[in-house]
Image: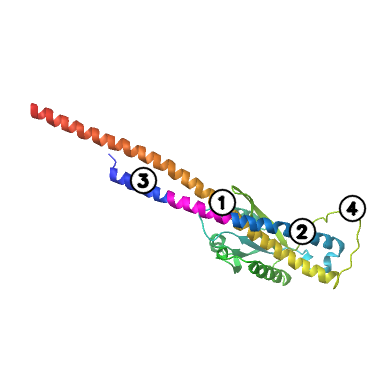
Amino acid sequence: MPNLRDIKRRIRSVKNTQQITKAMKLVSASKLRKAQEAMLRARPYALKTKDVMNSLAARCDKDQHPLLNIREVKKVLILLITSDKGLCGGFNSYLNRKTNQLIKENEGNEISFLFAGKKGNAFFQSKGFSVVEDYSGWTKGYKFNMSADIAKKLTDVFLEEKADKVYIVYNEFKSVIQQEVIAQQLLPVVPGEAKESGQEVDYIYEPGQEGVLEQLLKMYVETVIHQSFLESIASEHGARMAAMDNASRNAKEMIEQLTLFYNKARQAYITTELTEIVSGAEALKG
């Protein structure tokens, strides 16, 4: 028969775990609201920056700036944005899976990484890839300055031809329970189609078209990276909130099952003891 003390200890342990998961869910819910607000405020700016860059790039020669130059791909650099902590469901595993797919697509090329987050670093560094920079611990106090620093590092690597193509891999926030893994080419910048205003307009550029384009491309790379970090922060809190909610529900079901098992075992013990008492009494009468 099972030991009743062990079952009670197991129930107490699961209840303690349930309290932790509930607390983590509440903390993530609080952080998610702030992260979601910051992300939504930044989205229109990121979209408008892209529109302006597309409009200007469509009017100028693509050879006018080296960040627009497409060359033969031999070296690929991947900026991978993951979390520093776990307990957030499939948040990191989906990112690692998408990155593995990207590596297979670039088979034969030299692959290097710039990591933002301990989980991506732990997964890929052991595979022998070159690491340009590691920003593990970024989730503790993220600021725009870090995106600007990463943007400068990536553009320098591209301009020095240490990488012919640069990708960014991150989770885009869709809802609390849904995040989409994005693998986007960052460099060389590939302008999309400019939005048509309905009439052709000529602009005067100060200090000149080349100077404006250079500043705009720099701003565009910084903005894409910044927005990716904001999306990742909101996605991580959403994923952790959902994971902790599932864990709390599973703990509740386990407690109910263990309590039922405990009651059955206790009833069996009582029945056995009563049977022994009755048997002993009958033996004394005989």
Horizontal side of 20 relative to 147 (left or right) equals left
Asked whether residue 234 is drawn in magenta, I would say no
> What whole-number distance in Å separates the C-alpha atoms at marks 2 and 3?
55 Å
Task: Give the residue type at disc 2.
Answer: Lys
| Circles 4 and 2 in contact, beta carbons < 8 Å | no
CA distance for labels 1 and 3: 27 Å
* Mark toward the start of the polypeptide (2 vs 3): 3
* N-terminal label among 2 and 1: 2
Q: Which residues are magenta?
A: 18-32
Q: Amino acid at mark 1?
A: Ala
Q: Are marks 1 and 3 in contact (CB under 8 Å)?
A: no
Which residue is label 2 attached to?
Answer: 48
Q: Could you say which quadrant of the image residue 162 lies in?
A: bottom right
Q: Which disc number belongs to residue 239?
A: 1
Residue at mark 3: 11
Residue lying at the far top of the rendered structure? 286
- Label 4, on which residue? 198
Residue in the picture at 83% in, 60% down: 55
Of the two numbered discs 2 and 1 in the rendering, the one whose residue sits closer to the viewer: 2
State left or right for residue 252 relative to residue 113.
left
Question: Which sits earlier in the primary sequence, circle 1 or circle 4?
Answer: 4
Residue 193 coordinates in the image, percent (x, y): 82, 55
Marks 1/4: CA–CA distance? 43 Å
Q: Secondary structure at mark 2?
A: helix
Per the image, label 1 sits on a secondary structure element best described as helix
Q: Earlier in the sequence, mark 4 or mark 3?
A: 3
Residue, x 25% and y 36% (percent of image)?
269
Q: Magenta stretch mostly in which secondary structure?
A: helix
Q: Is residue 25 covered in magenta?
A: yes
Residues under labels 4 and 2: Cα distance?
18 Å
Residue 54, given in percent of the width and then of the height, sits at 81, 59
